[in-house]
Structures are given as structure tokens and as C-alpha cells.
Image (tube, rainbow, N blue to C red):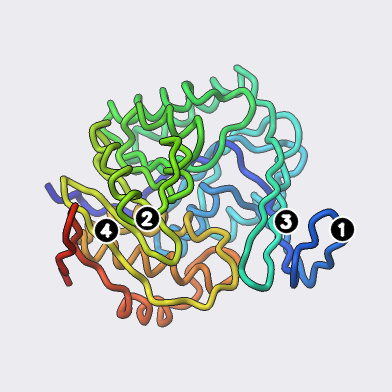
Amino acid sequence: MQSLKTNKVVTITLNPALDLTGSLDELNVGSVSLVNNSNLHAAGKGVNVAKVLSDLGAQVTVTGFLGKDNPELFHQLFDEIGAINEFIQVEGATRINVKLVEKDGQVSDINFPGVQVSPLEIDRFEKVLFKLAEEHDYFVLAGSLPSGVTPELCASWISKLRHQGKKVLFDSSKSALAAGIEAQPWLIKPNDEELSDLLGQELGSFEACRDAAQSLAGNGIENIVVSMGADGVMWLNDGEWLQAQPPKMSVVSTVGAGDTLVAGLCWGHMQALPNTDLLRFATALSAMAVSQVGVGLTSQQELDEIKLNTQVKQICSSTNVKAN
């Protein structure tokens, strides 16, 4: 049954970060590396998704946990994108993550631990979350978990939202992803590395990734999306696999490309796009993200051109059948 269109969405970032991104020719491990230019900005997977969704035209409400000591850049971003701020402020400072982008496009992430969340702060968050569930159908829960929030607790929120008929798009990794899958979110989007880690086996080919993702279908998850970098995106929905292949892009930075894909998938569903159009749109949006620093819709014309050159086809276990 086709969903009704909506532009209202909630993004949940339990462990946001200030991203300190530095561009350099080459990272000299164990020695001195010179950064050519740098940027400090509010981020975290759900925050990135919120920015892209806002650019696309969504009315975004943001929530999660934010350190009291350094919220200014987050508040500034939320004002800029017109997001409704429902973050719970907690004791301490939001972490700073370092991302070093080399000239060849390779990215080294140095992720620091987040704030310590207390039971009282968790209770406050739950009240906000389920109040928002009274007026929203789409929830994007993305990123890692701060200390004090267990994978099981996170999974319980997914489960409660699902039982209320909400569409939860869940993008995480490691133990949080494993526990979250058991709660049957409406959509998951592991990349090939996260899928390998989840199943404890090296997935060295397209076929291996597809078969591994297929094995998750029995968990009752409606939409399983696997992002494979330059090799495109696979999506399993209602027993049908679609694969999208974007054109070759000039890579500036891959930071935020996965978050952009999640935002595109969410917006496409919110706008009730047909599956083929939806996957082409989300894949093209993500491909455009690697050609820029930071996330966001920077050029509608460029996006349209990438969409025209993004191929979408049906795939199955043994043969590929071109769709359109």
C-alpha cells in the first residue's frame, strides 16, 4: 500500500560530535602531518541526515543527547536549517571527532567517546521521543551510542516505535546494529564493512554482500539497503532486489555520503516515490556528496545530471535483469 506523503521527520542522534575535518596531502602515521585546511562543525550521523533532509524540504525535528558545555555550533546549525531542537542537554561536553582526508580520498577517522548519560537524562529523552511519536511517522535513528545507553535500551526504543506503527530507519554498527536488528526497524542501511562485521565473515564480492543481506530478511525488516561505495547500492524490499550504480565521481571526501544516502531514502519514502525512482534519487544524492566537503544539497542541477547517469536494475540470485 502506497504511503501518504509527509514532510515531517524526527532524526535521533544519541552520540553527536563536533567533527574536526582536516585535508592533507598524506597522513604520516607516527610522525608529523601538515593539514592544508580544516573545518569544525556540528555533526553526528543523525545531525548530518537532518541537514540533508532540511535541504530537500523536510520539516525536521532533532533530538538526542547534547553536552551542556559546548552546544553553540549545534544550535547555530539547527537555526540555519530551521530544525526544531528537542535535544536533551546533559552534563559535560559533546565529543570532538577528527577526520583526516588525504589527497587520494582516503579518510582516517579518530572517534572519541561521547558524554556519560544518566538514567534521569534517559528518562527525559524517552518522554520527548514518545511525545514526538504522537505527531510523526518517520524516525531516523543514526550513529553510535553514548556511555549509559546500552544496545538493548536503544533496541527497546526501536521496538516501541515500531509497535506504534512508526517507520524507523536505523543506521548504526557493531553491537548497536546487532541488537537493533532484533527489534525489527523498518529500514537498515549497513555498508559492506558493517555487514561483514555484523555477520563475522569477510564479504569479498557483490554476491556475498547480497546473500548476507538476504539472510537478514528473516528478521522481519521491510527494507534492507547495503551501500558499497563506488559499487553502488542494493535494496531488498518485499522480496525484490534493486541495484543502483552511480556514475564515476571525482571524490573529494566520502565523509557523510552514507548519511546522505539515508536522508535520500527517507525523503524518497516520505514523498511516496516509486521504488526505482526512489533508489535512483537516493543513490545520486549520495554520489554527489562525495564530490564536496560536508553534507547538503549544493546543486539541484548537478543532482539531476547524476540521476540521469545512475543505472537501476533488478537483481536476483543468479542473473541480472535490467529494469530501467
Q: Amino acid at mark 2?
A: Ser
Mark before the other along the chain sequence, 2 or 3:
3
Mark 4: secondary structure: loop
Which residue was labeled with disc 1? 31
Q: Are marks 2 and 4 in contact (CB under 8 Å)?
A: no
Which residue was labeled with disc 3? 20
For the point 41% across and 31% down, which residue is it? 180
Image location of residue 315, percent across then percent down: 20, 59
- How dense is the environment of label 3, judged by Cα within 10 Å: few (below 14), some, or many (20 and up)? some
Asked if residue 47 lies left or right of residue 113, the reply is: left
Instruction: Kindly indicate the quadrant of the structure image that contains residue 316.
Output: bottom left
- How dense is the environment of label 2, judged by Cα within 10 Å: few (below 14), some, or many (20 and up)? few
Image location of residue 219, percent across then percent down: 27, 31
Which residue was labeled with disc 2? 205
Which residue was labeled with disc 4? 271
Choose mark 2 or mark 4, whichever is in front. Answer: 2
Q: Amino acid at mark 4?
A: Gln
Give how far apart the Cα atoms at labels 2 and 3 are.
Answer: 33 Å
For the point 26% across and 33% down, which residue is it? 165
Give how far apart the Cα atoms at labels 2 and 1 are.
Answer: 35 Å
Q: Which of the two residues, 185 or 3, is positioned nearer the viewer here? A: 185
Residue 130 visible in this rendered orientation of the protein = no
